[in-house]
Image: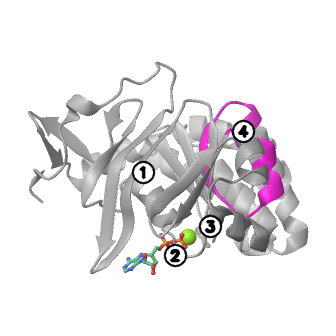
């Protein structure tokens, strides 16, 4: 594939400089339409390094599309995203951004780990094999080193005893914890979670939230889409409320949850609380 010019994207001159720590995400005036439907409408958002941002909003408001835009799984129509000041899907030349080839994007995407609602584990691989797959194939780690790291990660998510089990033998909560270990195995600068507990039976939600809470406390930069308001109140530095492809408001949980500025936020919270 050849490099595609993206002249509609604004000049990089406008970028803010990153703070110096790792994992800072800057979303800069991102818009995206599917046909006539504008799913992201001029979204700008900075997630400082080490911070946890929770995104809330009704179904269809663009939350998943925004997360997917951060690691270039979704190609935006205009705007761009940087991780520590680096573009993930483009290179810049003058005032123009050129889309990178897929192989190059894949290499850069290791900076951004993603955990989905459905766990997406490889069914034919054991838990350990699931976790070492990407480090070995994408990061070119040796199998021995990747295995050592993977065992430490499985201990961290409380699954040391399941290393040699196949995913179908695990509960949904255990599978999701494996998916988190697998995302961490690439040593990402940023972790994205898209409704990580929505597919779980209620009694399994807590064990997954415990792992995410542990990551939040250890200073991992994270963007989490969730409807778990109690959890959001506890771990979020910033809560963002999205509606119809726009950020209606953002602020610390103490403000957004107790004194939302926007009627739509209050209406949404009344439904999910
Ligand atoms: P949320 O995660 O907040 O529920 P999404 O980002 O998944 O919202 O979707 C936002 C809107 O974009 C929805 O109306 C959805 O139907 C639409 N959409 C998402 N992905 C696609 C796609 N690949 N093609 C067409 N429409 C899409
Ligand atoms: Mg979604």
Contact, CB < 8 Å: mark 3 with mark 2? no
Badge 4: residue crowd in 10 Å (few <14, some 14–19, many ≥20): some
| Residue 102: image location, x then y, percent | 25, 55
Residue named by callout 3? 264
Q: Nearer the viewer, residue 175 or 134?
A: 175
- In-front residue for pair 270/134: 270
Q: Which residue is tagged 1?
A: 70
Label pair 3/4, CB-CB below 8 angstroms? no
- State how far apart marks 2 and 1 are (Cα): 18 Å
Q: Residue at coordinates 62% horizontally, 59% vertically from top-left?
A: 262
Regarding mark 4 in the picture, which secondary structure is present there? helix
Q: Which tag is nearer the camera, tag 2 or tag 1?
A: 2
Mark 2 C-beta closer than 8 Å to ligand 1? yes
The correct choice, above or below, for 123 with respect to 257 in the image is: below
Q: Which residue is mark 4?
A: 216
Residue at the extreme right: 203
Query: Distance of mark 3 from mark 4, alpha carbons?
Result: 28 Å
Q: Quadrant of residue 151?
A: top right
How far across and how far down the image is residue 80, in percent?
30, 47
User: What whole-number distance in Å separates the C-alpha atoms at marks 3 and 2?
Assistant: 14 Å
How far across and down, in percent of the image, does residue 1 sit? Answer: 12, 60
| Residue at 21% over, 29% down | 13
Badge 2 crowding class, 10 Å Cα cut-off, few under 14, some 14 to 19, many 20 or more, is: few
Q: Nearer the viewer, mark 4 or mark 2?
A: 2
Separation of marks 4 and 1 at Cα, in angstroms: 19 Å
Residue reaching furthest bottom?
36
Range of residues picked out in magenta: 216-237
């Amino acid at each position: 594939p050849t490099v595609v010019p993206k002249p509609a994207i604004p000049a990089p001159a406008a970028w803010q400089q990153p703070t110096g720590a790792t994992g800072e995400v800057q979303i800069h005036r991102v818009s995206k339409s599917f046909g006539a439907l504008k799913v992201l409408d001029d979204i700008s958002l900075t997630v400082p390094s080490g911070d946890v941002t929770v995104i809330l909003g009704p179904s269809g408001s663009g939350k998943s599309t925004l997360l997917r835009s951060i690691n270039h799984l979704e190609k935006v129509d205009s705007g761009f995203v940087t991780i520590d000041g680096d573009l993930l899907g483009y290179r810049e030349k003058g005032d123009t951004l050129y889309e990178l080839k897929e192989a190059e994007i894949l290499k850069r995407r290791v900076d951004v780990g993603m955990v989905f609602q459905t766990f997406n584990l490889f069914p034919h691989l054991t838990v350990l094999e699931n976790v070492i797959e990407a480090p070995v194939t994408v990061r070119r780690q040796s199998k021995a080193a990747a295995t050592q790291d993977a065992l430490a990660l499985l201990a961290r998510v409380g699954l040391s005893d399941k290393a040699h089990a196949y995913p179908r033998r695990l509960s949904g909560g255990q599978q999701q914890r494996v998916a988190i270990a697998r995302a961490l195995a690439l040593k990402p600068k940023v972790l994205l979670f898209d409704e990580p507990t929505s597919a779980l039976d209620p009694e399994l939600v807590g064990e997954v939230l415990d792992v995410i809470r542990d990551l939040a406390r250890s200073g991992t930069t994270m963007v989490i889409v969730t409807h778990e308001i109690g959890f959001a109140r506890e771990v979020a530095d910033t809560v963002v409320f999205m509606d119809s492809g726009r950020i209606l408001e953002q602020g610390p949980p103490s403000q957004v949850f107790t004194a939302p500025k926007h009627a739509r936020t209050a209406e949404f919270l009344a439904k999910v609380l």
